[in-house]
Amino acid sequence: MKKPKRYCSFSVSITRDSGLKSLRIKHVHASPQKRRMAAQWEYDSSMASDLFSIALLKSGAETLPQPKWPPGFLALAIDPHFAPALLTVGSLEYQHGFVKEAMKLFLTLTELPENEEDLAEIIDKAGNFLLDHKDFKNALKVYLSAERAYPTQALYYIGSGYCFYKLGSIAESIRKERRAVELEPSNYRHLNDLGFSLLEAGLLEEAETVLKRSISLAPPEYEFARNNLELLYERQKTT
């Protein structure tokens, strides 16, 4: 049985492999629009190939040809600022133990123009990826960097607020979530997050007000604020 190819980080591959280096050189003088189009085409092709391979395996195929490069490598070689590839390759680097390299790619996302397509969602996915791995300190670095770069985007304050909560700094968590609510006062999810942090801090009266507002704005199927309000009432009984 053929052994799987050992993973080599992108930062090493782009300097050592002649194919990747020539790919970057080929596109370095192209316009940003053409470079992005080429990266998008390569990225989409790679994703489509992966889906096709999964379908073949499910249909009974025993072996499949292994691509030379992991997903996102070629797209990132073409355009070092292509956000989807920064997220994909960063996630791979992290999973293979190259944490510093992964963080460099994730933080590069926070240096892109704010009008980059789906940028807020992609940065949040990077943060959530780190949260899923319980790496709250590095997730916080990503969200704080995003806050500095895009100070009017509420989503990043919610992310950093959650990180501070997990790191035991409830006061800082509340401060961040207040800022998110200031930016998006009708966002019932942000209100629920703030209400829960206020509840955890023992600020029950304000928490009740905030959670009730979240409930008033939320669709019927959103249960988190109602559940948190019930928890608040239970705690009021014991105080």
Image (tube, rainbow, N blue to C red):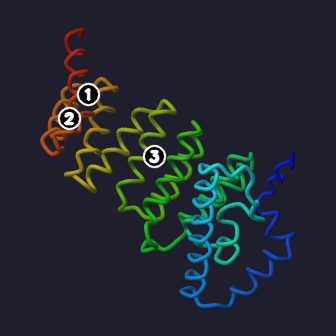
Alpha-carbon neighbours of circle 1 within 10 Å: few (<14), some, or many (≥20)? many
Q: Quadrant of residue 50?
A: bottom right
Q: Amino acid at mark 3?
A: Ser
Write the residue at 55% across / 82% down. 37
Which residue is the extreme one toward the left? Answer: 216
Q: Position of residue 223 (x, y in %)?
A: 24, 34
Which residue does the numbered mark 2 point to in the structure image? 211
Residue depicted at 72% across the width and 49% down the height: 62
Q: CA distance from mark 2 to mark 1?
A: 7 Å
Does residue 192 appear left or right of residue 69 in this picture?
Answer: left
Residue 86: quarter of image: bottom right
Give SS at disc 1. Answer: helix
Foreground of the two, 94 or 49 = 49
Q: Which residue bears the numbered disc 1?
A: 228
Residue 213 against residue 117 in the figure, above or below: above
What's the CA distance linking mark 3 and mark 1?
A: 21 Å
